[in-house]
Amino acid sequence: MIINHPLLGPRDSSEFTYLGDASLIDRPDPQADTAAQDFYEYQYIRENPAGLLRELWFHEGGDRSWLVVTRNTITHEITSVEMARDVARARGRSI
């Protein structure tokens, strides 16, 4: 599978490490009243959908950047690749 890195161009997926669902960017607020339950769900509760999914990938064999890859989990077709820092900033998170 080829991942088209936004800065470095096409790279083989073997250069990357898969982390999981890109919703991990949205860490819970540790100060919230429901922090214990929120962190439990954040760490352990995962969906495993068939179809389009936004995933976190780490470019371990390259520039060590984090990417958000939108991929069809059935066909492995990649429809977009974004820098995770840009996705986090767009969601109002500081890096």
Image (spheres, rainbow, N blue to C red):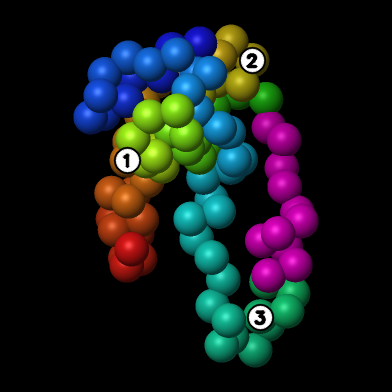
Q: Which type of secondary structure does the marked residue at label 3 adopt?
A: helix
Amino acid of disc 2: Ile
* Residue 28, quarter of the rendered image: bottom right
Residue sticking out furthest to the left: 7
Please tell me which residue is depicted at 68% across the width and 32% down the height of the picture: 49
Circle 1 packing at 10 Å, graded few (<14), some (14-19), many (20+), is some
Residue at mark 3: 35
Tell whether 91 sits left or right of 31. Answer: left
Q: Nearer the viewer, mark 1 or mark 3?
A: 1
Residue at mark 1: 83
Residue 7 painted magenta: no
| Span highlighted in magenta in the image | 39-49
Q: Which type of secondary structure does the marked residue at label 1 adopt?
A: strand
| Image spot of residue 81 (x, y percent) | 36, 29
Q: Please name whichever residue, 58 or 60, is drawn nearer the observer in this view of the structure.
A: 60
Separation of disc 2 and disc 3 at Cα? 34 Å
| Image spot of residue 47 (x, y percent) | 71, 42
Residue 43 painted magenta: yes
Residues at discs 2 and 3 in contact (Cβ within 8 Å): no
Please tell me which residue is depicted at 72% across the width and 35% down the height of the picture: 48
In the drawing, what numbered circle is on residue 48?
none
